[in-house]
Amino acid sequence: MLAAPVNPADINMIQGNYGLLPKLPAVGGNEGVGQVVAVGNSVSGLKPGDWVILTSAGLGTWRTEAVFSEEALIQVPKDIPLQSAATLSVNPCTAYRMLMDFEQLQPGDSVIQNASNSGVGQAVIQIASALRLKTINVVRDRPDIQKLRNKLKDLGADYVLTEEELRMPETKAIFKDLPLPRLALNCVGGKSSTELLRHLAPGGTMVTYGGMAKQPVTASVSLLIFKDVKLRGFWLSQWKNNHSPDEFKELILTLCNLIRQGQLTAPTCSEVPLQDYQLALEASMKPFVSSKQILTM
């Protein structure tokens, strides 16, 4: 293994409250990039020196070495940055599939999301920009809010609002310049998801892929009846179960092309040596963290 990030799902898995739990004892970590050291006699698609990522969650990436079957690995090009390769198989895949699978969006259409500074949020901003979609990005207020606004706008965000600003009547002015979003992406739940729904176009879809607030999604009866909004969920592991390994490989290569073209970068990262994993885990659970912790081996 070369590098592996600490994601919220990794923490949830350790806590025992994730949708997929490995048999114990287990190694933590669900994504990362490794370099092939040696291959068995029957392996034909990989060779020593190749960079690889894992096809499935729950296999354990927070370690220096591992033995996997050829089917458990996908080769990725070595001409992309190491941090991009290490963070490729979860957040950008989730962002891309949510943008493509729920609404038939066209250039000029808009998308609204919360937790916009998360790994998925940053990927949504960049992929949407590459698809010529407009993004309305909601974040929690914080002391360095202007710094965060600038960072997300540098990634391609069209609008960056705090949760409080989204509730203000003046926010309606934004929708004079762009169409109401037909797609909302919710990683928070609670009041935040209710606000996303309020700004959704009639017949639009809100996709929930996380629940950081640990509060349920609440939709008013009037929104369901008079605006006919749709509530959906997304889990990448389930998407993989419903699609072939070749389709997942195609998704990975599509994202690699965006990385090569400079249209998709890794989230802001802090590299931590594997032996200091406790520091990385503690940092990843602090509030307002905009830097993904990456364990380096």
Image (cartoon, helix red, strand yellow):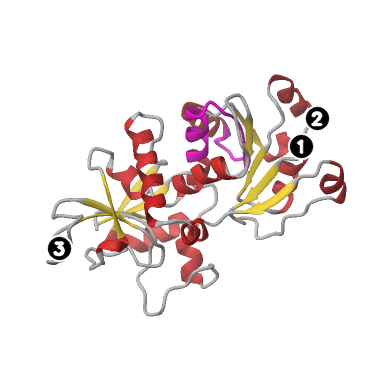
| Sequence-first tag of 3 and 2 | 3
Mark 3 element type? loop
What span is colored magenta in the figure?
123-145
Q: Residue furthest top?
A: 177
User: What residue would you read off at disc 3?
Assistant: 39
**Which of marks 3 and 1 precedes in the sequence?**
3
For the residue pair 221 and 118, the one nearer the viewer reads as: 221
Q: Are marks 1 and 2 in contact (CB under 8 Å)?
A: no
The quadrant the N terminus occupies is bottom left
Tell me the amino acid under the disc marked 3.
Val
Residue at coordinates 33% horizontally, 49% vertically from top-left?
A: 86
Label 1, label 2: how many angstroms apart (C-alpha)? Answer: 7 Å
Which residue, given by chain and number where applicable, does mark 1 sit on?
A: 167
Describe residue 41's horizontal placement relative to residue 150 as left or right: left
Instruction: Say which quadrant the C terminus sits in.
Output: bottom left
Q: Nearer the viewer, residue 138 or 234?
A: 234
Q: Residue furthest bottom?
A: 24
Q: Position of residue 78 (x, y in %)?
A: 22, 42
Residue topped by disc 2? 169
Location of residue 116 in the rendering, given as x and y in whole percent from the top left corner: 56, 40
Which circle, 1 or 3, is nearer the viewer? Answer: 3
Classify 153 as above or below 94.
Answer: above
Q: CA distance from mark 3 to mark 2?
A: 61 Å
Is disc 2 placed on a helix, strand or loop? helix
Is residue 111 placed above or below 38 in the rendered structure?
A: above
Q: Nearer the viewer, residue 145 or 109?
A: 109
Residue 224 can be seen in this image: yes
Q: CA distance from mark 1 to mark 3?
A: 56 Å
Asked if 252 appears above or below 144 in the picture, the reply is below
Give percent across and percent down for residue 9: 49, 60
